[in-house]
Image (spheres, grey):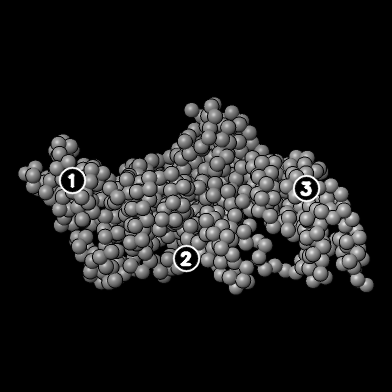
Amino acid sequence: MNSLLKYITSKTQLPEKAIKNTLALLNEDCTIPFISRYRKEQTGNLDEVQIGDIVSYKEAFETLEKRKATILKALEEQEVLTDELQKKIEATTDSTTLEDLYLPYKKKRKTKADTARNNGLEPLAKIIMAQNASDIYSIAEQYTSDSISVEEALEGARHIISEWINERSDIRNMLRKQLERHAVLTTKVVKAKKDDEKAQKFRDYFNWSEALNRCPSHRLLAILRATEEGFIRLKIDPDSHRDDNSRILSKIENRVIKSNGDCAEQISMAIADAYKRLLFPALSNEILNAAKEKADETAIQVFAKNLKQLLLGSPLGEKKVLAIDPGFRTGCKVVCLDAQGGLEHNETIYPHPPKNDSKGAIKKISTLVNAHKIEAIAIGNGTASRETEQLIRRIQFDRPIQVFVVSEAGASIYSASKIAREEFPNYDVTVRGSVSIGRRLQDPLAELVKIDAKSIGVGQYQHDVNQTKLKNSLDRVVENCVNAVGVNVNTASTSLLSYVSGIGDKLAENIVKHRDENGTFFSRKEIKNVSRLGEKAFQQAAGFLRIKDGANPLDDSAVHPESYAVVSKMAKDQGVDISEMIGNKKLLQEIPLEKYQTETVGLPTLQDIVKELEKPGLDIREPAKVFTFNQNIKTIGDLEPGQLLPGIVNNITNFGAFVDVGIKESGLIHISNLSDSYVSDVNEHVHLHQQLIVKVLEVDVERKRIQLKLHK
């Protein structure tokens, strides 16, 4: 525990006491949302990001310790483990140093050095390395045979020396630092693929050169993808003077060669061989992999930020919605949903080519809006979206109907999923997709949790980054978002419930099953009746589960049941019922919180309770706003430099933001066009689904690229 605590403290710079208490809570199977919300006194008010960092470093430490154990066991079996080596391994805090220590003993394929040793040439290699012999050629004659000449004996000895040099951690670390500072990434197009249509999006990298340590995440991932797909060849050069390695070789020689003469000459040759054949290939791969790992982290962070913004997107709320999945030849699939997202009706209309039945479509939409008391219309943003939106806006409804264009990203994934089949076993994928579009308008979070986050389309190169790290990061984002908003236990789907702190897939299924068999829950206490939902799960989940219109008004708040007694005492002391205290800001602010502090309930928790009682169950998300694209812009050919257009941010990267201006292609506001001053973080200037005005700077119809500028 002390080693783990020391390791995390060195990595995070967080207070040791906060880390220690957080680790204790994690070891008690407490979740990140629960710890950050309800255990602030123990953690020193750490937020979910800081607690997430502790979890990540805890996992990294455990992985390192597991690897150490494997290596120590292997060394013991080889009978080469000394006390000194064991101490070095146990004291190591990073995997690179650990692997360097293990390298000389690591089992590998038969090498040139192994062959030389089998030929009895290791003593000759030791003599050369001692650098005392004046005539190494005469000595080498002693190691010749019918099949080995003097030159071959010396060459074999050099292979052994090359391996020794390769295994020296000081030399490897020196070369690592050189490559970290000076390595250059260069690319060349594969001639046979130069005119390939798919290769054109990588055209910028057909002949590219850049310092590896300055190559931004998105560019490195693009180059690696182009390499993987066979469009370009990638090479790492030691520095910009790539044809001259003398400077690096001299640095190695200064560490190894201590004399002049024949031995020095042989060692110098061995160094050149070690560098070319062993050191540089291994360490250049290592440095590229490290750069890839760093690029992955950056890309995953961008993806996580985008996903959080998307999940916390504006909900319309419990309103009756007519949703349309637009299409031309196959028609527009229309569904009517009740206020809770239940499917009431579905059919297909054909207002666009080739059938062009716009009159029939308008009549049908008007009838459905009236029959189902529709309050808003959601239109998917895919094929025929603009044409469908224009059709809907032509309809003269007898009352105001809000019209929204909704992102379809991932809807097709959901519609064909097991979850969708279980929800709608008697309907095809087109109906399920339309339902998803409508529900996204009602509550984006509740609907999007049903879809694999990678399919939602708010990241770049998500299939190229480390998939395990990506999944862990995105799962954590979803969990934090779901618990930040809270979940109505009586209406939530299994998918949504599964992300609630302490619940998981199986308990989520049990909650829904219990609800189906016994009806709605009237209090949080009743949740304990769910099969296999024990005290620990209840403790972790209760504060995030809401009971609307229940017996206890606190059940529809973020106040945890363990604090109900404190609230009751507050109300009693104020001479009012709890229900009278809720929403009474003046009364709540007059409560002397210090009076209610105990060993376990401190000021942070009491302040949270009062804040929640002021506006219980308040949705932290902004309400949905109606938005309209420029109706004159239908294709990329309609765009001209200088135009000002309304748009919606639909993706954010670390090099800029992509904006939907109502056509198939999204435009890019490069980071340099977000502001007249320097921009370090795109998210400081725009957020996902933000409605804004952009200025068209440049249109490349052939490459389908649109350059935009944020208009203030």
Q: SS for tag 2?
A: loop
The image quadrant of residue 582 is top left
* Residue highlighted by disc 2: 417
Residue 385 is situated, as x and y percent measured from the top left of the image, at 51, 48
The image shows residue 697 at horizontal and vertical percentages of 61, 31
Of residue 506 and residue 130, the one placed in the foreground of this image is 130
| Sequence-earlier tag: 2 or 3 | 3
Q: Judge left or right: residue 215 versus residue 469.
A: right
Q: Amino acid at mark 1?
A: Gln
Vertically, is 646 above or below 145? above
- What residue do we see at 66% from left, 45% from top? 177
Query: Looking at the rendered structure, which numbered label has been put on residue 112?
Result: none
> For the residue carrying disc 3, how many other residues have a C-alpha within 10 Å: few (<14), some (14-19), or many (20+)?
few
What residue occupies the far left of the structure in this picture?
575
Q: Is residue 462 left or right of residue 480?
A: right
How many neighbours does mark 1 have within 10 angstroms: few (below 14), some (14-19), or many (20 or more)?
A: some
The residue closer to the viewer here, 116 or 665, is: 116
Where on the picture, by quarter, is residue 439? bottom left
**Residue at position x 66%, y 53% in the image:** 169
Instruction: Provide the secondary structure element on which disc 3 rests.
Output: loop
Residue 712 appears in the figure: yes
Q: In 3D space, how far apart are the residues under numbered discs 3 and 1 (Cα atoms)? A: 71 Å
Label 1: which secondary element: loop
Near-viewer residue (499 or 195): 499
Disc 1 marks which residue? 597
